[in-house]
Every structure is written in structure tokens, then in C-alpha cells.
């Protein structure tokens, strides 16, 4: 199975499913991948792209286009992540789907529970292990 983290290829064979994902989700995706009967190839883009979300759509487009010949199916492991719908436009253009939600905090909780938590505790600051480091 082919695994790549921020561009580094870890082992050789073509996957059936490849995911172009945010590097901030690498740990979670790796844990999920271990549970799958047919693991996917994880290709993480640098988490630092969150500092410049306008760069996420072009980076995702470039990686999806690279992977199309190597995988049967490519998906996008990002929520909107501050792109203001630009990532959705790229996904529509390329015919790929992305994770639901505005950002990974919503993704982790689910849309309805996240909205309730957010309403109960306005002004909450969210951290992932990436941001905490």
C-alpha cells in the first residue's frame, strides 16, 4: 500500500482509494486507516496551509491531478477550512468529494452536535494536536 505524508512516499503499491488530506488530520487518518480492511493511500498536504487558506484549493487540485493515474478513486480530506467555497469549486471541477463541514472541529463532532456545543459555549477556541504543538 502506498502511503505519503507531506510528499514522502512510505511504501510502493498503487492504492484503490487515495485521500488528499490536511496534514493536521494525519494522525486521525492513520488511525482510521489501520481499521480498514482495504487501506487507502494518505497524501497529506502541509498543515501550514491553514495559515493561508486561499492556497488550499490550488494545492488540492495539483495533488488530485497527480494521483488520478495511480488510484481508482481520489477523495479530499479537508473541510472548507477557510477557503470560502473555493475548495468546493475545485472539488466540483475535478469531480471529487470532500469531508463535510466548515472546518475539522465540526467534522470531528458532527454538524449538529458541533452547532449545539458552539451555541452553548460561544467564543470557544479550538485546538488540534497540530495547533497545540
Image (cartoon, rainbow, N blue to C red):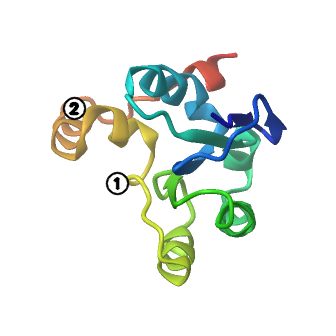
Look at the image and tell me in which quarter the N terminus lies.
top right
At 61% from the left edge and 33% from the top edge, which residue is drawn? Answer: 24
SS at circle 2: helix
At 67% from the left edge and 58% from the top edge, which residue is drawn? Answer: 70
Question: Where is residue 62 shown, x and y percent of the image?
Answer: 75, 67
Q: Nearer the viewer, mark 1 or mark 2?
A: 1
Mark 1 Cα shell of 10 Å, populated few (<14), some (14-19), many (≥20): some
Look at the image and tell me in which quarter the C terminus lies.
top right
| Vertical arrangement, residue 70 with respect to residue 61, above or below | above
Left or right of residue 128: residue 104 = left
In the picture of the structure, the residue carrying the numbered disc 2 is: 117
Question: Where is residue 81 shown, x and y percent of the image?
Answer: 53, 53
SS at circle 1: loop
Front-most of residues 1 and 27: 1
Question: Where is residue 109 shown, x and y percent of the image?
Answer: 28, 33
In the picture of the structure, the residue carrying the numbered disc 1 is: 100
Amino acid at each position: 500500500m502506498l502511503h505519503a505524508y507531506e510528499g514522502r512516499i512510505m511504501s510502493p503499491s498503487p492504492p484503490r482509494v487515495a485521500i488528499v488530506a490536511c496534514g493536521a488530520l494525519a494522525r486521525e487518518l492513520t488511525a482510521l486507516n489501520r481499521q480498514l480492511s482495504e487501506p487507502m493511500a494518505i497524501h497529506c498536504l502541509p498543515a501550514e496551509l491553514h495559515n493561508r487558506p486561499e492556497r488550499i484549493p490550488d494545492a488540492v487540485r495539483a495533488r488530485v491531478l497527480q494521483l488520478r493515474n495511480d488510484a481508482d478513486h481520489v477523495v479530499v480530506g479537508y473541510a472548507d477550512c477557510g477557503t470560502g467555497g473555493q475548495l468546493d469549486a475545485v472539488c466540483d471541477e475535478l469531480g471529487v468529494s470532500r469531508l463535510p463541514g466548515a472546518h475539522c472541529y465540526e467534522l470531528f463532532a458532527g454538524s449538529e452536535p458541533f452547532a449545539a456545543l458552539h451555541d452553548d459555549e460561544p467564543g470557544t477556541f479550538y485546538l488540534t494536536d497540530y495547533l497545540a504543538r
